[in-house]
Image (spheres, coloured by chain):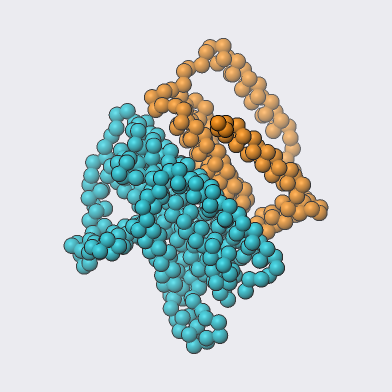
Chain colours: A cyan, B orange
Amino acid sequence: MYDFAPFIDSYTSYLNAHFSPFWAGLISMVSLGVALLLFYAVLGLYLVYAERKVCAQMQNRMGPNRVGPMGLFQTIADLIKLLLKELIYIRNADSFLFNIAPFIVIVASIMAIGSIPFARGLQAVDLNIGVLYILAISSMGVIGVLIAGWASNSKYSVIGAMRSGAQVISYELSVGLALLCAITFAGSMQLSEIIASQQDGWWIFKGHIPAFVAFVIYLIAGTAETNRGPFDLAEAESELTAGFHTEYSGIKFAFFFLAEYMNMFVIAALATTLFLGGWLPFHLYNFTAFNTVMDYIPPVFWFFGKTAFVIYVMMWFKWTFPRLRIDQLLALEWKYLLPISLLNLLLISFLTLMQWHF
Amino acid sequence: MSGPKIIFFILAAAILVFSVMSIFSRRILRAAIYLLFVLVSMAGLYYMMNFQFLAAVQLILYAGGIVVLIIFSILLTSQINSTLDPPRKSHLLLGAVTSVLGLILGATTILKYSFQASASAPIGTDMRTIGRHLLGTGAEGYALPFEVITVLLLAALVGSILIARKPKV
């Protein structure tokens, strides 16, 4: 539970001993893909469940509580229902683009998960440019949204897609600048090195106020990037029925739905890794007994606990703030967040240059 | 055949097929999406050569930036039912002649050129090395071109804002 590297090493050495290099590579690729897909599906379902529970809590309701204990199997029942639903064929839609759009969205989010460090030794690929890779891959998702809106041949969808495009392109700047703050502190883009640089304290504590400002900007811009409330103009159900996925039904709609939740998970996991120390336990300076107790909690729990906390905050946003208008949304980014994050980056570069962080 | 070779051939085939489809498609948004597939496959090739930074830049600039801009302008200007008109006969002929000439020129140049492996040790593609070279002022530093390009981009930004701005009433 504390270190996954020996387990993975023994698995790869078993494969190398019993198969030729070609088949060993293929089998490890396939097993990794299956593991990631299973993780993706299960986590996606339970994020939907969590969202419904959090929403219910915010609105003083019970939430799903009929299917299974505490409604735990509700989303699985929903999934089966969605799988059985008819896929509606639209006569005047561009069928090729209409069918490929959900896959672009879902591939973008699943590829980002591949490089997230879940625990010590539990990371599929540790790229030299990890943060940039996740940023690049998740910027592909908006293409799926845009072509979904256009190919549906419906005015609601096109308006939703246009809004979503303008929003994601704008907020990508703030996300990038906020991530750059953490990269400046750590001096590396490799996720494992960023975690290693937080061995003696998380960046949100070590980096004084600028790090906290960067964290808050990242959370706001990240929420906007996933098209979630209060920035859910792309699907604003009261004005656009369902925005870019109005015309989708059955499992294709479920893909969009699942991708939204997994994008939220990727944003939260990146926030955890860069600002909250990844899978490292919480340590207090000079409290040896406390630190030893904290070390007994396995890294996986630390990672998922912190990520769950960030996700909870994002859901809290959604259910307590009213939706922004499109001009307010763009003004927030270009007139407030972007200048603040540029200044913040300058301040952080200076802090790092003078070695004033802890 | 080894694993990387198979992946290389898949990517190369994808690049070729989607390039041709992108040119011959009559629907403009489909052409843009085929172009996206070409660019993504090229990022895959870069990644296979271990140029991870270049692959990410390819994705973030071309796939995430330029293709999104193209799609945006298509969304604003064209309708779903509109397809491009078939080209005129004279244009078709002229285009065919030019592309055959280009093919001959390119093929002869590539076949004549004797590719030789460079003797000097490869510079690492580590992010730190790239950063030091990009902003270095010493030997093999690219600080001056980098700054010149930033000034150019700034001028382009200011110019576009000036054009797009509403006149003051």
> Within the image, what quadrant is residue B151 found in?
top right
Residue A283, horizontal then vertical, whole percent: 51, 79
Residue A51, horizontal then vertical, whole percent: 32, 59
Task: Give the camera-side residue of A316 and B36.
Answer: A316
Picture residue at 35% right of the left edge, 58% below the top = A320
- Count of number-bearing discs: 0
Task: Give the camera-side residue of A205 and A295.
Answer: A205
Task: Give the camera-side residue of A325 and A294.
Answer: A325
Picture residue at 64% right of the left edge, 26% below the top = B103
Q: Is residue B38 above or below residue A125?
A: above
Judge left or right: residue A156 versus residue A61: right
Task: Give the camera-side residue of A327 and A2.
Answer: A327
Picture residue at 62% right of the left edge, 48% below the top = B54
In the image as oriented, which residue stretches furthest toward the bottom? Answer: A289
Picture residue at 63% right of the left edge, 20% below the top = B98
Let me know if residue B95 appears in the view. Answer: yes
For the N terminus of chain A, the quadrant is: bottom left
Residue B164, horizontal then vertical, whole percent: 57, 33
> Within the image, what quadrant is residue B154 found in?
top right
Residue A240, horizontal then vertical, whole percent: 33, 40
For the C terminus of chain A, the quadrant is: bottom right
In the image as oriented, which residue stretches furthest toward the right? Answer: B139
Judge left or right: residue A294 versus residue A193: left
Judge left or right: residue A351 versus residue A7: right
Judge left or right: residue A252 versus residue A298: left
In the image as oriented, which residue stretches furthest toward the front? Answer: B169
Let me know if residue A116 appears in the view. Answer: no
Q: Is residue B21 above or below residue A50?
A: above
Q: Is residue A86 above or below residue A202?
A: above
In the image as oriented, which residue stretches furthest toward the left? Answer: A66
